[in-house]
Image: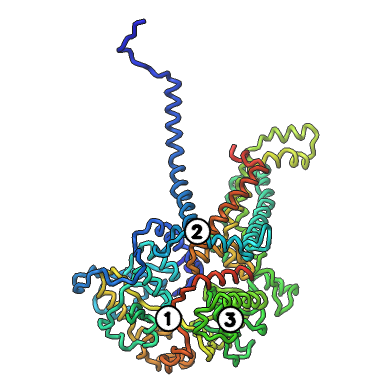
Amino acid sequence: MAIDASAEIVTPPGRRRRRGTAKVNLGLISVPLLWLIVFFLIPVVLVALYSVGVLTLISYDKYLSLELWRYFLHSDTYLGGPLGRGLFWKSLKMSFGVSITCVILAYPVAYMLALVAGRRRYTLLLVIITPFLTSYLLRVLAWRVLLNPQGVIEAVLRNGGLVADGSQISWLYNSTFAVYLVLAYSWVPFVALPIFVSLESLDLQMLEASSDLGASRLQTFRKVTLPMSMPGVIAAFVFVFIPTIGEYVTPQIVGGKAGYLFGNVIQSSFSSSFDWQLGSAMSVFMLAAVAILLAIFGRYLNMRSVTE
Amino acid sequence: MGQLDAVLGNPATRRTFLKGTGVLAASGILAACRKNVDESGAATAPTGSIGPIEDEPGVLHAHEWAGYDAKWLYQDYLDAGYPQPKFSFLVNTEGALAKTAAGFDWDVTHPESGYIQDYLNMGALQPWDTSLMPNFKHLNPVIEASGQVDGKQYEIGLDWGYSAPLIRTDHLDATLDSYSYLFTDDAAGHISWFDTPWILQMAAIAQGMDPGHSFEMTDTELEDMKNYTIEKGQKNLYNIWVNYQDMWDDVQTGNVWATYAWPDAYVALKDKVDVAYIRPSGGTLAWVEGLVLRSDTENYHHAHAFADAWSAATVGTRLISSWGYGHANLEVDLSKIDPDVVKVFGLDDPEKNLSEPQSYLDRYQANRNAYNRAWNEVKASL
């Protein structure tokens, strides 16, 4: 068969389109990927190198050592064994409790907005979120005004005769409770958002079908609404859990001596203690612990559906 | 000034609430990409050329505490016609050290004397030529000695203060003359500490340890003090303050009866509530801060003029009266200062009162990490 050498080899249009799509995808993903590499992966690696002394602030101090890891991992104060009394477990429990509380508080709000409020839902959503557009620090400091022994809450209780003059409610301020309360308050609106989105995208015909098949409202909620909104609930839980486990500002402002958390030790190690190696070891440990916990949550709570 | 300080409106913060928050991010990245400060760690001779003042760039870069850019602190410098310095601000000395290690440039900065050796280890400092500073001869030699290493004046000590108990005299007997106010069961639930490992040293001094030795405790002694402090803290502590104005409020409202304090707290509170500032006669811990000179500064003469302006007696008078900090100049006009403040600072004889055994000035601690780790464990155990 004679071949016409001058004939142009033409790529089929479908393959060309696929190649074009692949280039676009690569272009789209490269920016966030680069961002993650530069601002997440590389810093994490650097922190890990600090934790073993390969990197140090002062060059002549450089040495490879696992001594700080050994100190930290054997510390009763910071770890104290699995689910022990160590500070890490205290932070974990606090973060878990705050996340659960936030989800429980935010769910009815999101439900009302998504399924009851009708056309006013976005206006109401904005109203709920508005106070939280102010400075985080300002809001936490406002709680100090409310909770401190001379604050509004104790004054009201004292005037009402519920607290005797000269005595104080010791658990209200400079306490674990205060940290728990303020963290829960701070995160509720952010938790409501993913739940709201999840509920808003519910197929309402499913609810009608459930009702038509004889399910009560409670049964419909339990068997249809709640399971279908779980991706939003899980996302909301993770939204709170990850940042609060390393929280140190709120404990410092309202926690007093009892509110000291794992994040405070890390912050202290990097600043006033000038002990970057220990701070780095703790940071890497916390990062690994959070990653493992998320993997566990993902496995048991079908996290994949969040991304689908 | 940090965001929180801006919220609180602190006029001049030495140790602010969010210690190092902003510094951490910046210095972490800078540290990883740092330029070489000094690989050897040895103290270095000046690397910048010391030519005539006319050849210098002229705009001095001072890395200072927030609020220390107030013009009255270096008014003589401006009056002499030098250009307004450029200021950047430090949140704490540890953060400033981290930034310096990461390659951050400055001509002068203002660390506590205990950190001079750390800067020297980085090769970041050169000694001052005190003959270029007319006011230097008026400065307290005890304070200036704390700024010397190997006979060279690496820091011009300027502001200073004690770290000692401030007590509410309507709740506690003021005759105790000891650091034990910070641990006593008599003030259970009303004691406040500052966030510093010096609390461990104060516990040791309260139990009879020589204050000088408290800077170099053995591991066993440190462990004992850690356990003692945890025990007392769990039982008697109200809180650990990080912002001095919070502490003032707590003393004023009666939440706190005994607290770790600098003399400025006494100046601020003495006319509002019944307080006494206790300088234990067995030895009081004291801190000194001053200006250090960058090894490669191009503003050598400007830096000396700036430090000299800071050293003036007029600055001292105002610093003591307004801010409640001590000043190294011995020519300070005591007639313009509240006699009560003169007494608390021991300004009638500052050389004697800042010397051992009356006072023990802050110093370099080679074992500082052990102190910091013990202190972090205390905080985590309360």
| Kind of residue at badge 1 | Val
Q: Which one is closest to the eye, mark 1 or mark 2?
A: 2
Q: Is residue B133 above or below residue A38?
A: below
| Kind of residue at badge 3 | Ala
Q: Is residue B74 above or below residue B137?
A: above
Q: Quadrant of the N terminus of chain B?
A: bottom left
| Kind of residue at badge 2 | Ser
Q: Residues within 10 Å of mark 1 (few under 14, many from 20)?
A: many
Who's the residue at 35% across and 76% down the image?
B291
| SS state under label 3 | helix
- The x and y percentages for residue A198 are 63, 41
- Subunit that carries the residue with mark 3: B
Q: Dot 2 corresponds to which residue?
A: A51
- The x and y percentages for residue B305 are 27, 78
- The x and y percentages for residue B370 are 53, 71
Q: Which one is closest to the eye, mark 2 or mark 3?
A: 2
Q: Kindly give the residue lying farthest to the top in the view shown.
A: A1
Q: Is residue B216 visible?
A: yes
In depth, the one of A117 and B281 nearer the eye is: B281
Q: Dot 1 corresponds to which residue?
A: B288
Q: CA distance from mark 1 to mark 2?
A: 32 Å
On the image, which quarter does residue B277 sit in? bottom right
Who's the residue at 39% across and 62% down the image?
A59
- Of the numbered discs 3 and 1, the one sitting upstream in the chain is 3
Tell me if label 2 and label 3 are in contact, CB under 8 Å. Answer: no
| SS state under label 1 | strand
